[in-house]
Image (cartoon, rainbow, N blue to C red):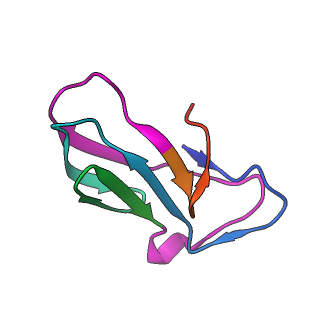
Amino acid sequence: MLTNDGSEALEDWTLTWTAPAGVQVANGWGAEVSQDGSTVTATAPRWARVLEPGASAAVGFQATGPSAPGPDDFRIGGTACAAA
């Protein structure tokens, strides 16, 4: 779940994270999900480009590979953020 805890809307948001070695994203939902090497990117879908303050967007994906360790280095538009 991606939640905008800020005071300004996030337009055309992009969420990235680093997948563990050997993990390949098979598909995603709630965003346009793609993978380049170990970097996974989820971009705002056309039907939900703006995430208003306090609003949330559910982003999911299926992947193949090892389940541990988990993904890390989550970022929104280049700014580090926490995963919950």
Name which quarter of the figure residue 7 lies in.
Answer: bottom right
Q: Residue furthest bottom?
A: 46
Q: Position of residue 13 (x, y in %)?
A: 56, 67
The one nearer the camera, 29 or 40, is 40
Image quadrant in which the N terminus is located:
top right
Q: Position of residue 76 (x, y in %)?
A: 57, 57
Q: Is residue 58 left or right of residue 38?
A: right
Q: What segment is highlighted magenta in the picture?
A: 44-73
Q: Residue at x 49, y 68 (%)?
A: 44
Q: Position of residue 50 (x, y in %)?
A: 63, 71
Q: Residue furthest top?
A: 68
Q: Position of residue 65 (x, y in %)?
A: 14, 33
Q: Residue at x 45, y 55 (%)?
A: 16
The answer to if 29 sits in the magenta stretch is no
Name which quarter of the figure residue 19 lies in.
Answer: top left
Image quadrant in which the C terminus is located:
top right
Name which quarter of the figure residue 53 lies in.
Answer: bottom right
**Rendered position, 21 above or below 37:** above
The answer to if 45 sits in the magenta stretch is yes
What is the total number of numbered labels drawn onto the structure image? Answer: 0
Q: Residue furthest right?
A: 7
Q: Is residue 37 left or right of residue 71?
A: left
Q: Is residue 4 left or right of residue 62?
A: right
Q: Residue at x 28, y 35 (%)?
A: 20
**Rendered position, 18 above or below 42:** above
The one nearer the camera, 79 or 8, is 79
